[in-house]
Image: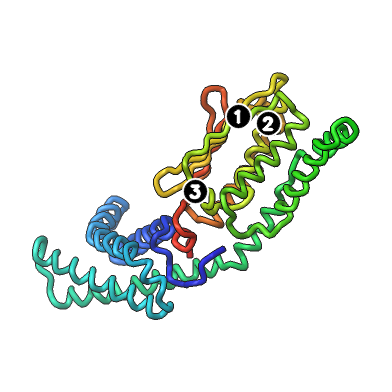
Amino acid sequence: MRKSNRIPNFRNLGIHLRVLLWHVCLLALLTIVNAQPGWNAWQWGSDLAQLGAQWLPPLLLVLGALTLVYPWLARLPYRAGGAAIILLALVIMLVSAYGYDVWIAPLTVAQYWQGMLLCLGDVVLCLYYLDLLQRAYSPAIAEARLQALQARIRPHFLFNSLNAVLSLIRSQPQRAEAALEDMAELFRVLMADNRDLVPLSQELALCRQYLNIEKLRLDERLHCEWQLADIATDIMIPPLILQPLLENAVYHGIEPQAQGGVIHIEIKPSGNSLLLRLSNPLPLRSDKAGGNKMALNNIRERLRLHYDLEAQLRQYEAGQRYIVEITIPTRPMAEVVHG
């Protein structure tokens, strides 16, 4: 599920945001340490802005360079990769200091050395922090959490579907047999080890089997419209991402309505990501809303464990419909996971 290389993934948005936050905190601490007598909050803000104007441009250059060379860094052993990161940061710091010396204000040799030593200490501390972060998100911990989340996915349709199948055994035995086969496949996936990604085609097949089962109960009240763009169905996604959303759509949006309704499922590329959009009639206000949020929170946390900040889930209401959108990166998994 996760990459074993300890080199931080500098193509992950979460890493960039954490590095920036780390430096903002560090600069804020430096302004407090260097505070003069009579120091106040206004002076602190002014000093922080001045210090940030000096340090943040080189930092952004370093992050940009590390993003470009990350595929090469990821192939190196940790110590060699760490040394390469330090060397790259020192070179960029030296070039930045030279540009400051030429175009803004002259620097002494001592200031050059001071800047280089501060840069060295900064990079070493930052690498240590990111290494601690990766240990906190170690495969054993993350996979155990994923397993716990998967175990909480409880299909609401189990007993209803069994009753529907029983009612068909005498009158339509072939249809009942097909429904039991769909249920067997569905529960095989639900009870499998779902820590790794699966092809999109597998998730789509699972969703269709689930809808076939629900069709036994709801018949003409349930209609689905699929909009699948020209995408490769071998794209890898987390398992059981779309099926629980369909379950929510049926349970909250279709089943309470006497006339039923239509579920729209749209899957299309969006830049370097895959967009999954599902909409259903706006649910009737009832005590079922809590289960809806539980399923969404479950999916959101599993996305975070797989992709950190690279995946997004949002829900909103528009045109009397309830809409859920999931955005998943389509880059290789080794370039997406954090740590």
User: Does label 2 or label 1 sit earlier along the sequence?
Assistant: 2
Residue on which disc 1 sits: 280
Q: Earlier in the sequence, mark 2 or mark 3?
A: 3
Task: For residue 315, say whether it is visible.
Answer: no
158 horizontally vs 211: left or right: right
Q: CA distance from mark 2 to mark 3?
A: 31 Å
Q: Closer to the camera, 272 or 148?
A: 272
Quadrant of res 269: top left
Amino acid, disc 1: Asn
Residue 180, can we see it? yes
Three-letter code for the amino acid on which mark 2 is drawn: His
Q: How packed is label 1: few (under 14 Cα within 10 Å), some, or many (20 or more)?
A: many
Q: CA distance from mark 2 to mark 1?
A: 9 Å
Q: Say few, some or many: other residues with alpha carbon within 10 Å of mark 2 (under 14 / 14 to 19 / 20 or more).
A: many
Residue 153 % position (x, y): 70, 48
Q: Are marks 2 and 1 in contact (CB under 8 Å)?
A: yes
Nearest the viewer among 10 and 112 is 10
Q: Is residue 305 above or below residue 285?
A: below
Q: Are marks 2 and 3 in contact (CB under 8 Å)?
A: no
Examine the image and state in which quarter residue 29 appears.
Answer: bottom left
Please report the residue visible at 66 percent of the width from the left and 45 percent of the height from the top.
Answer: 206
Question: What residue is disc 2 on?
Answer: 252
**Looking at the image, which residue is at 34% across and 71% down?**
122
At x 30% / y 62%, what residue is drawn? 31
Residue wearing tag 3: 232
| In the image, farthest residue toward the top | 259
> How far across and how far down the image is residue 133, in percent?
49, 66
Q: CA distance from mark 1 to mark 3?
A: 26 Å
x 65%, y 24%: residue: 261
Q: Where's residue 103, x and y in %?
A: 9, 61
* SS type, badge 2: helix
In percent of width and height, residue 335 lies at: 44, 61
